[in-house]
Amino acid sequence: MPTKTYMGVDVRRDHSFRIPRPDLTVRIGTPNTCSACHKDKTAQWAADKVVEWYGPKRPDPPPFALVFDAARKHIPGVEPELAKLVLDIKRPAIVRATALMQLGQYQSSSLIEVSIKMLGDAEALVRIVAVRNLENLPPERLEARLGPMLNDPVRSVRVEAARALSQLAPTRYSDKSRAKAKLFWKVLDEYRTGQYGLADQPGAHLNLAVIYENLQQPKKAIESYETAIDVEPTFVPARMNLAMLRARQGDSPEAERLLREAVKLAPTMASANYSLGLLLAENPTRLKEAAKFLGIAARNDPGNSRMQYNYGLSMQRLGAAVEAERGLLAAFKLEPRNADFVNALVIFYSQQMKWRNAFPYAQLLAQLNPNDPRLRAQVEFIKRNAFNAP
């Protein structure tokens, strides 16, 4: 049997067999049982053998791998397929929870609707993801939806709800004598106790720091972030979060120092470079340096529309038209109905006096904002310049 290395050090022979789907390996690069043993053969050879022995038809239902692959590549129109997977109770809990997690990246109306429904799902794993998907709801809705989850019979679900609700603690749970507040603080203590039990792991101190930030206790948050770094000096997320906290406190030099350490530890980490680039861009005289880090972020996370957008804007401000256009178009292709991205292209092409290029984006922007008369006037202005219309 072939071997696998577990936990980075434990080499074991893997006796698990899954339904061989070398055809999926050919299509999207997933591993398959055939190739694990027949290392001298290609995935196409294995796929051809399966067809030779069993015919071209594959068992229903269709593999969820294709839907997940499309979601990870940000292919438009995949949201309904993800929602179908979430709602299909015949699927394993891990598949449904993963589909719900991937649905979260789209922030569509279906995300909220499906996530609210999944709060009552029989599978705890699905309920946990549903809670996470809803944590950015407005305060009233957040409390209404997640407050009842504090009574969930599964600890991992209720503590996740308490973590999400902690952002409301300073205003809605300040009176600890109220029944709702008592329950919240009780479950939040469960969450904190669990993190203290993992004190040898930097992630636990990071989680506690985020809670302290939500509770508006910055001193304790800083201490927890610094503890995370002490436990694991190469732990980048703690440096990034601490840098953001220092920046909010007005200490930009310290924030920059921490972010530069993060980039040094993880040179290709998109989020670290992006955060440093945004911080530097706050100073107009450092825009060229900022664009360098924004460019690294955009190259290392091509599926992140906001990174592409900000890189494009930085190039536009520096007068690098080719790079600016590339970045702005990349953002638009990822989110073609994002008004910010469409507007940026209208402005870019108008400044370049490429009126025919600007025209379709101006039309789309007016469609996205049908009640704004200024955009209709803009369409007419660009149309006259593009087509010499009277």
Image (cartoon, rainbow, N blue to C red):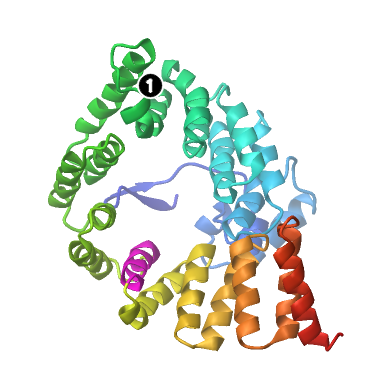
**Location of residue 279 (image quadrant):** bottom left
Res. 46 in view = no
Q: Identify the residue at horizontal 63%, vertical 75% (top origin).
A: 345
Res. 95 in view = yes
Is 267 drawn above or below residue 139 in the view shown? Answer: below
Q: Nearer the viewer, residue 169 or 273?
A: 169
Give coordinates of residue 304: x percent, y percent: 51, 63
Give coordinates of residue 91: x percent, y percent: 63, 33
Is 275 drawn above or below residue 151 in the view shown? Answer: below
Q: Nearer the viewer, residue 99 or 19?
A: 99
Secondary structure mostly seen in the magenta stretch: helix
In the image, which residues are magenta?
Answer: 270-282
Is 2 drawn above or below residue 276 in the view shown? Answer: above
Q: Identify the residue at horizontal 65%, vertical 82% (top origin).
A: 350
Q: Which residue is mark 1?
A: 155
Residue 274 forms part of the magenta stretch: yes
Q: Identify the residue at horizontal 57%, vertical 40% (top origin).
A: 100
Horizontal side of residue 344 vs 181, given as left or right: right
Horizontal side of residue 108 vs 310, given as left or right: right
**Location of residue 364 (image quadrant):** bottom right
Horizontal side of residue 388 vs 26, given as left or right: right
Give coordinates of residue 185: x percent, y percent: 30, 20
Residue 126 forms part of the magenta stretch: no
Q: Identify the residue at horizontal 32%, vertical 14% (top origin).
A: 182
Q: Secondary structure at mark 1?
A: helix
Q: Quick one: quadrant of the C terminus?
A: bottom right
**Location of residue 284 (image quadrant):** bottom left
Give coordinates of residue 115: x percent, y percent: 58, 33
> Crowding at label 1, few (<14), some or many (≥20) Cα neighbours within 10 Å?
some
Q: Nearer the viewer, residue 321 or 37?
A: 321
Look at label 1 and name its amino acid: Arg
